Amino acid sequence: MPGTDVQRTIDAVWRIESAKLIAALARLVRDVGLAEDLAQDALVAALEQWASAGLPDNPGAWLMAVAKRRAMDHFRRQERLDRKVAELGREFETAGTYDDGLDDAIDDDIGDDLLRLIFTACHPVLSTQARVALTLRLLGGLTTEEIARGFLVAESTVAQRIVRAKRTLAAKRVRFELPERAERAERLDSVLEVIYLIFNEGYSATRGDHWMRPALCEDALRLGRILAGLSPDEPEVHGLVALMEIQASRLRARTDETGAPVLLLDQNRALWDRLLINRGLAALQRAESLVDRRGPYTLQAAIAACHARAPSPEETDWIRIAALYAALMQAAPSPVVELNRAVALGMAFGPQTGLDLVDELMAEPTLAKYHLLPSVRGDLLVKLGRHEEAQREFRRAAELAGNERERALLADRTVAAGERASAP
């Protein structure tokens, strides 16, 4: 297999397997930083061996077996940890090679390493930003660059947060376990934030050749559903699950047969998954039944429900959506929410109303490199017939976009606006 093909294959395997690998290793070694190091060692071994020996039948199991051997080597070098050596040694004596049943045999009452890893990474000894960055790195398998794009901060900043977070967890001897119910509630906000960020990376990939990464959406949904089962009386957990279910219902309609993005108003609604919509609406009803004042995730789920219930784009209740965004600004104010509100206002009351709000956001520093700001402005300018200005905005948006598919879409819109501008 050529070197570039091997690298591409390993990258794909890593995306799929890294979170499970790190989570399982963390359970064994009780150290998140060490678990990631061991997983990286296995990745290096794969790079060295797969080029000549070929891809193994089960790449994930291969990486796990190599990582566990590295763990054994590590503990053997640490005489103080003889107990760990014996524990791992017994595993291999019993199983001989890695198999799925090995992990099942040592599972505890929760039975989900990924969820345990999220709660460990979201420990209160870490800042909120560090918790989110670390969990995205460990659970989502994202690079520091991808996380930086998601947070609109410098890549070096994210890298420093992750390194410091792992050092802090090790220094504070944070145990790899699911906390008790009271402590679990304290970490819930950042856990929800992390799960939704993972979902969003799957829903709209910040970079790469694919518009979506559905596996990340599935992971986030699974984690959200498990969390809802563990926290049945937490309205925002159900609100987040509702939001993800309804958004996930559109995955099949979000790209065409070539993989190109299809915008919401252009989607074939017959492709929307009604089962997921119904699950989402039920979760939304559950969230709203638990609290008088809706939180950020429940409000976003209510917005998604407006789209899900509309038979066509023309029948969408944009006035209600604009009102929900206004409520969201009260609950969780941010420039991105305000940008979304501008879109809703433009649909409900005309493009000039939306453009007025977008123009106010042009001076917002955190949106300076956010490609959706010029993209939204370009769309509103098109509707106002100001095609030459729209062309400049779409070109600017394409320059800022990190995803190849999204960049291509914006480039097409740049050309289309230019053609309209030059038309007699």
Image (cartoon, rainbow, N blue to C red):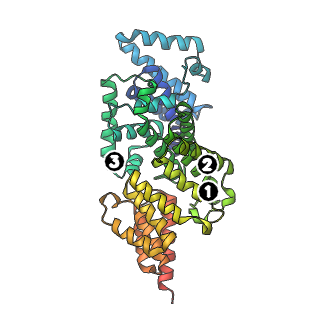
Residue 232 in picture, x, y percent from top left: 55, 34
371, 305: nearer the viewer = 305
36, 11: nearer the viewer = 36
Residue 41 in picture, x, y percent from top left: 43, 29
Disc 3 and disc 1: Cα gap in Å? 36 Å
Residue 286 in picture, x, y percent from top left: 58, 42
Q: Are marks 2 and 1 in contact (CB under 8 Å)?
A: yes
Amino acid type at mark 1: Ala
* Residue 210 at least partly seen: no
Residue count near mark 1 (Cα–Cα under 10 Å), binned few <14, some 14–19, many ≥20? many
**Residue at the spot of label 2:** 281
**Residue at the spot of label 3:** 155
Work out which quarter of the rendered image holds the N terminus and state it: top right
The reply, left or right, for residue 15 in relation to residue 31 is right
Look at the picture and state if 269 lies above or below 116.
below
Amino acid type at mark 3: Glu
Question: Label 3's element?
Answer: helix
Residue 308 tag number: 1
Amino acid type at mark 2: Leu
Look at the picture and state if 274 lies above or below 411.
above
Q: Residue furthest front?
A: 292
Label 3 or label 1, whichever lies nearer to me, is 1
Residue 385 in picture, x, y percent from top left: 48, 81
Look at the picture and state if 209 lies above or below 383.
above
Residue 156 tag number: none
Where on the picture, by quarter, is residue 52?
top right
379, 406: nearer the viewer = 379
Disc 2 and disc 1: Cα gap in Å? 9 Å
